[in-house]
Image (cartoon, rainbow, N blue to C red):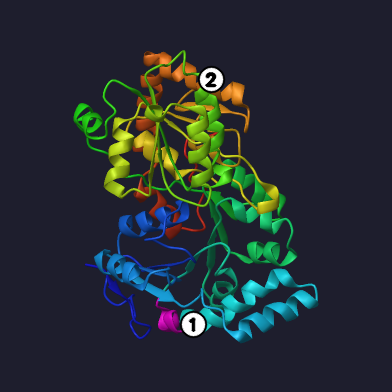
């Protein structure tokens, strides 16, 4: 069973692999790609792991999750804003340094807890998910004389381009780990020294075969061509784009069923659009699903589709797309977009197809091809599953983070 680590404990006691410290703002049980990545990393790494993160929205949900995990979790009150915090942020806005306000608050809240946790050589490095805790993590790493390793996903690069301080933080890291070629290119453009940025593979759990016919009966999908989208319901995820493209296919694929899982602010808009474009029996929204339900949906579908768009003014871009690899682990090909880090997750014409963002005609063509050409779809699904089993293992991830000075571990087949 998991436990909540206390600041007085030294997680490095005993023999075996050196302890790993992950620091990040949002963490499970909240939902998202970064949360999923670090949750599975903490589960998959050998030796002691400690996660330092913000308190979630529900103390009861946090407690239930933390106690069931096999690693230590330390939650800090980072979401709370005191009067002093608001005054500091307003003063920084007045002097034209609004970008630093959040980092000052994070320093105030996280610096001393991190300093206490890293005393007596408790951890050989600080592994920090950029950008929320980067400033306190850097300060503590400098004081303790240990490396700071940053994990940078995608959206952060859009923020860095507008903030000199953000770029300065990025360049101070001993190592920058990324998941995609896109992120590797962005690091170079933002001035990270050659050799400091590395692309590393994450791990994706292997999936045992499931009774597909039984799952389709359970979910009411028997005899249908099933397209699945699983994501947060946000504008940039492109569910509206998929709905419009599927509406073009109704005559060509009359047995189509579109399943949409996830929740978010745009869900009401997507549901309204679905009622306008498709018959009620052709689309279903499920809201948030459990991990078991997610695996069942992957196992029963024919095709996974997630077609994110870039929204620069909202600092939104798809940094990679772990969900594509989760689909691949079930032998399901994907349709994605030529956007951000997606081409490193979906290999065009090998493990799926890529289309330009918001190109409805191209998306409709890709959907039609993979829904009507069974041999092609199944071949892509097999290649996708083989790639995940071969390249995306936690042993490779752990090897990379335990040897931060080594060579890049670059999954084969990226663009």
The range drawn in magenta is 115-122
Mark 2 neighbour class, 10 Å CA radius: few under 14, some 14 to 19, many 20 or more: some
Main SS of residues in magenta: helix
- From the top left corner, tell me how far across and down residue 296 is, in percent: 28, 38
Q: Is residue 6 magenta?
A: no
Q: Is residue 117 magenta?
A: yes
Residue for badge 2: 248
Nearest-to-viewer mark from 2 and 1: 2
**SS for tag 2?**
helix
Residue for badge 1: 115
The residue at 54%/73% (across/down) is: 137
- From the top left corner, tell me how far across and down residue 41 is, in percent: 37, 56
The residue at 55%/25% (across/down) is: 363
Between 368 and 144, the one lying in front of the other is 368
Spatial CA distance of label 2 from label 1 is 58 Å
**SS for tag 1?**
helix
- From the top left corner, tell me how far across and down residue 242 is, in percent: 52, 31
């Amino acid at each position: 069973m998991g436990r909540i680590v206390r600041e007085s404990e030294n997680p490095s006691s005993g023999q075996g692999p050196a302890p790993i410290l992950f620091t990040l703002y949002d963490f499970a049980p909240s939902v998202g790609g970064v949360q999923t990545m670090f949750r599975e990393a903490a589960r998959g790494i050998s030796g002691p792991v400690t996660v330092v993160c913000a308190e979630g929205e529900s103390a009861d949900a946090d407690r239930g999750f933390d106690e069931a995990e096999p690693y230590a979790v330390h939650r800090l009150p980072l979401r709370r804003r005191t009067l002093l915090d608001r005054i500091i942020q307003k003063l920084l806005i007045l002097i034209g340094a609004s970008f630093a306000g959040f980092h000052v608050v994070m320093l105030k809240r996280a610096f001393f807890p991190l300093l206490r946790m890293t005393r007596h050589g408790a951890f050989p490095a600080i592994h920090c998910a950029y950008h929320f805790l980067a400033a306190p993590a850097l300060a503590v790493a400098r004081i303790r004389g240990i490396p700071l390793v940053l994990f940078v996903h995608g959206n952060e690069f859009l923020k860095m381009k507008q903030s000199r301080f953000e770029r300065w933080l990025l360049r101070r890291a001993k190592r920058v780990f990324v998941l995609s070629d896109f992120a590797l290119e962005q690091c170079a453009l933002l001035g990270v020294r050659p050799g400091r940025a590395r692309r590393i593979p994450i791990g994706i759990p292997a999936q045992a075969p499931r009774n597909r016919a039984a799952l389709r009966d359970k979910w009411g999908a028997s005899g249908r061509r099933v397209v699945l989208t699983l994501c947060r319901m946000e504008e940039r995820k492109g569910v509206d784009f998929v709905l419009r493209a599927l509406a073009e296919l109704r005559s060509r694929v009359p047995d189509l069923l579109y399943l949409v899982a996830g929740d978010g602010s745009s869900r009401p808009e997507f549901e309204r659009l679905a009622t306008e474009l498709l018959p009620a029996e052709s689309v279903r929204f499920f809201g948030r699903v459990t991990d078991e339900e997610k695996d069942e949906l992957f196992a029963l579908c024919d095709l996974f589709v997630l077609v994110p768009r870039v929204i620069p003014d909202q600092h939104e871009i798809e940094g990679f797309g772990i969900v594509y690899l989760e689909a691949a682990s079930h032998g399901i090909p994907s349709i994605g977009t030529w956007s951000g880090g997606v081409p490193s997750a979906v290999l065009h014409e090998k493990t799926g197809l890529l289309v330009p963002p918001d190109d409805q005609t191209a998306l409709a063509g890709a959907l039609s091809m993979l829904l009507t050409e069974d041999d092609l779809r199944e071949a892509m699904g097999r290649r996708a599953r083989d790639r995940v089993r071969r390249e995306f293992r936690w042993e490779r991830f752990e090897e990379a983070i335990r040897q931060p000075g080594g060579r890049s571990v670059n999954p084969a087949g990226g663009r």
